[in-house]
Amino acid sequence: MKLHGYFRSSAAYRVRIALNLKGLGAEHLPHHLRKGEQCAPSYLAINPQGLVPALEDDVGGVLTQSVAIIEWLDETHPNPPLLPKDPLRRAKVRAFALAIACDTHPVQNLKVLARLRELGLPEEKVQDWAAWVNREGLSACETLIKAEPGPFCFGDAPTLADLCLVPQLGNARRFGVDVSAYPRLLQAEAAAKALPAFADAAPEKQPDAE
């Protein structure tokens, strides 16, 4: 398999964690987002959205969108499972993950922030926007799992929820958010980061890290 990504991309970070948890190897192909390498014609032929990650399987298939990739990995390599078997619990894990992957991360990603700058917002306002988005999303996520047993987001093993949470907390810190306001999320993060699969997927551990 080939994983197209970027060390600082939280979406690619999610997929790296999933690959590690499943014990799967992949060739990592970096595309420097700040240099616009994701917009090169050769990469757009792989992912027309010009986003990372994209995963090429061993028979030439291409998957895009991190949550779709992770669910495919979970269906094709079911151990350890990243989604509960119980339909209600499964939906709750998905809802938490999508609160981050659909409603928080995309609104503060590089593409959106670049557009805000193009529209003339001063850098201070751009950073304030990103911090606000993270606070809004993480506050909701804190409430979603406040009553859930730990130490992970949904119990005693990592799920898709944890794969989305850990990278997003990293984003929040980069934008100056005081994450101490989210003790339940920090509990889940600490449990996750104690696992080699999460630690080895961290941005600073990647060969393309700057």
Image (cartoon, rainbow, N blue to C red):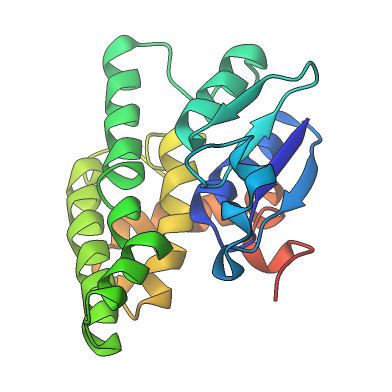
Q: Left of 149 or right of it: where is 9? A: right
Residue 41 drawn above or below residue 85: below
Res 181 → quadrant? bottom left
Q: Residue at x 41, y 57 (%)?
A: 168
Q: Residue at x 58, y 48 (%)?
A: 12
Q: Left of 49 or right of it: where is 42? A: right
Residue 92 percent coordinates (x, y): 27, 27
Q: Left of 206 or right of it: where is 62? A: left
Residue 61 drawn above or below residue 5: above
**Farthest residue, direction front:** 41
Q: Residue at x 50, y 37 (%)?
A: 66
Residue 41 percent coordinates (x, y): 64, 46
Res 86 → quadrant? top left
Residue 25 percent coordinates (x, y): 81, 35
Residue 176 percent coordinates (x, y): 34, 81
Image quarter in which the C terminus is found: bottom right
Residue 152 drawn above or below residue 76: below
Image quarter in which the N terminus is found: top right
Res 85 → quadrant? top left
| Of the pair 177 and 108, the residue shown nearer to us | 108
Q: Residue at x 29, y 21 (%)?
A: 91
Residue 51 visible in the picture: yes
| Of the pair 195 and 102, the residue shown nearer to us | 102
| Of the pair 37 and 14, the residue shown nearer to us | 37
